[in-house]
Image (cartoon, grey):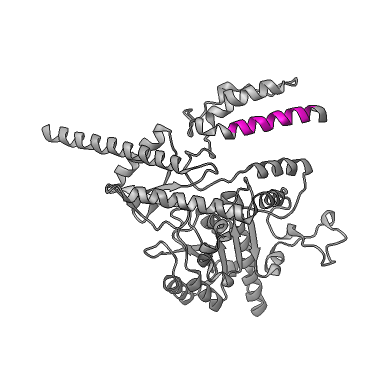
Amino acid sequence: MNAREFRRRGKEMVDYVADYLEGIEGRQVYPDVEPGYLRPLLPTAAPQEPETFEDIIKDVEKIIMPGVTHWHSPYFFAYFPTASSYPALLADMLCGAIGCIGFSWGSASEATLVALLAARTKVTRCLQAASPGLTQAAIVEKLVAYASDQAHSSVERAGLIGGVKLKAIPSDGKFAMRASALQEALERDKAEGLIPFFVVATLGTTSCCSFDNLLEVGPICHEEDVWLHVDAAYAGSAFICPEFRHLLNGVEYADSFNFNPHKWLLVNFDCSAMWVKKRTDLTGAFKLDPVYLKHSHQDSGLITDYRHWQLPLGRRFRSLKMWFVFRMYGVKGLQAYIRKHVQLSHEFEALVHQDPRFEICAEVTLGLVCFRLKGSNKLNEALLERINSAKKIHLVPCHLRDQFVLRFAICSRTVESAHVQLAWEHIRGLATDLLGAQKEEKADRKLK
């Protein structure tokens, strides 16, 4: 494909993408296909001769799209948002053309791991400086990290990769980590000769969007000289709105902080931002200078060499997408987008409250509503099965304590009140059918 054909096909692709996004509401949000559907539709080997662009595009609709879950559909309410916008898509195109290896970005999961490894290196070096006879292995086997029992599974994975113990701190009635529970765990472990060194506080948990109490947890970490990492992967975007910044109170105690613009800030996947209080704690853990990466500016102090900040050496030019989005939306436009999603979540919450068969299971703060039918877990599992089998909307569940809970997350850039209303009527109708079927089954059992 030469430049002339690229111009032609690029314009066609832009039209295809625009048509796809404009018409996405008409596509079934969740596919009908079964795992393995794609194998018989594809050749067993790559073509020897070039194929036409027209044939490839036809196969996108014929072969690929039937298996796609449409995450940007206004009827997609599962997980958390995966951001996308026309400016970001244009920037991504330019990013691919420039092909710059920026040495700078990672994911929220990576950020937690990087922070944990940096904290592990820091405490190991401090202890070895005080007791030169201590081996790294002897120290690591006593290290303990902590997170709320509502923390994302990536925190547990970071502990596994880092080779340290990770302990879950029981959350309170609002599913938040509090000072008393953390302090109790720290004192108990220190009494047993263990070494607390790392705490992850979550702002906006995946399960129910709860917020750990930084104003309580932060001072403890400071007093105990324990690294505090704040994971705000989803909720971090909302802090561009002043009315949500109180949820950040206590962030001054954090040693590192991460959020994902690709979740809720109209920057398409992947794009994650991480800050550290003391950069040498991070670069000291990961700095290596092979000769093929040395350059004339590395000791000048004029640049920040981000390859020392993350596990991978190379990253795509993700910041370009943010630059496009920020300039073309402006802060006010981004704030309006966040506020609209929050308003829609409260609209759904109000609808749930109007039906006495349902209950809200966690405080609605941002764009997530956790709800369920009053009754058993099996009843709610059956409801979710009916919802996702109907394929008109898509939801996923969580467990809050011992309850099976349905999550309704406002996700799509194009979602409106009408979509929320239709989704709720759909859920109510399926619930009515389910409860009616259960009554009939009970009646049948009594007759028998």
Q: Is residue 40 above or below residue 95?
A: above
In the image, the segment drawn in magenta is 5-20
Question: How many callouts does the rendering have?
Answer: 0
**Magenta span includes 15:** yes
Q: Is residue 211 one of those drawn in magenta?
A: no
Quarter occupied by the N terminus = top right
Q: Residue at x 51, y 63 (%)?
A: 243
User: Considering depth in this image, is 334 or 80 the residue closer to the camera?
Assistant: 334
Residue extending furthest left? 447
In the displayed structure, would residue 222 be above or below residue 174? below
Quadrant into which the C terminus falls: top left
Q: Position of residue 229 (x, y in %)?
A: 57, 65
Q: Say if 442 sits above or below 244 in the image.
A: above
Q: Position of residue 4 (x, y in %)?
A: 82, 28
> Left or right: where does residue 354 sit relative to residue 251?
left
- Decide if residue 259 is on the left or right side of residue 282: left
* Residue 295 visible in the displayed image: yes
Is residue 398 visible in the rendered structure shown here? no
* Left or right of 164, for residue 397: left
Position of residue 56 measured from the top left corner of the image (x, y, whole percent): 67, 24
